[in-house]
Image (cartoon, grey):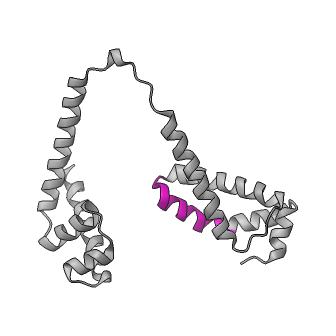
Amino acid sequence: MFNRSEFDKAREGDLKSIEEICASAWEPLYRYIYYKVQNREEAEDITQETFVKAISYLQKGNTRIEKYIIFLKNVSLNVIRDKWRKKKHQGTNINLDDVNPEVISLEDSAEISAQRELIKNALSRLNEEQRKVIELRILKGYTVTETARIMNKTEGAVRVLQYRSLQALSIIFRNND
């Protein structure tokens, strides 16, 4: 996409080169980050932060970058890890005097039980093959390859079946509202 001179210009602070690099890399980088965090707002923030860090690194001129998208993905992974570490260390402040564990336990248990029943009911409305693919892929976390082997299907057939099963579940949940 870009030749070495674009990076050299960006390293020197040429705004047009920086904009071109960002414009061409934004979409694949955003999709990669979104895949990792599964949250639109967080993915947008991390994408922006990645570009800021990458540009500042570029301008330091310490190394030459051969594949800029791989470089950006590595920077984004570092940003994601930093955010996760911060969240992990922050925790939540709780006033223990205000907490009634019995009430919270009952509320959580009732809500989880209701959600489980709703899911169980929806799954029972799928055909056997659809239930099986949802169970293997989503509930048990098998890969497409493993699921295909277990179900004696091609990987493409498993993907299509999973897609159609999720569409059917979506319709079932929508009709239950």
Nearer to me, 166 or 56:
56
Nearer to me, 55 or 114:
55
Residue positioned 61% across, 56% down in the render: 47
Instruction: State yes or no: residue 35 in magenta.
Output: yes
Residue positioned 32% across, 75% down in the render: 144
Seen from this angle, which residue lies furthest right? 12
Q: Which percent across, then down, holds residue 117?
A: 14, 48
Residue 175 sits above or below residue 5 on the image: above
Residue 81 sits above or below residue 1 on the image: above
Q: Which percent across, then down, holds residue 28?
A: 58, 68
Q: Which percent across, then down, holds residue 59?
A: 82, 58
Seen from this angle, which residue lies furthest top? 97
Residue 135 sits above or below residue 155 on the image: above
**Magenta segment, prevailing SS (helix, strand or loop):** helix
**Which residues fall within the magenta stretch?**
24-39
Instruction: State yes or no: residue 8 in magenta.
Output: no
Q: Which percent across, then down, holds residue 65?
A: 75, 70
Nearer to me, 25 or 139:
139
Residue positioned 59% across, 50% down in the render: 45
Q: Quadrant of residue 147?
A: bottom left
Residue positioned 25% across, 62% down in the render: 140
Count of residue discs = 0
Quadrant into which the N terminus falls: bottom right
Image position of 160 (left or right of 86): left
Image position of 59 (left or right of 45): right
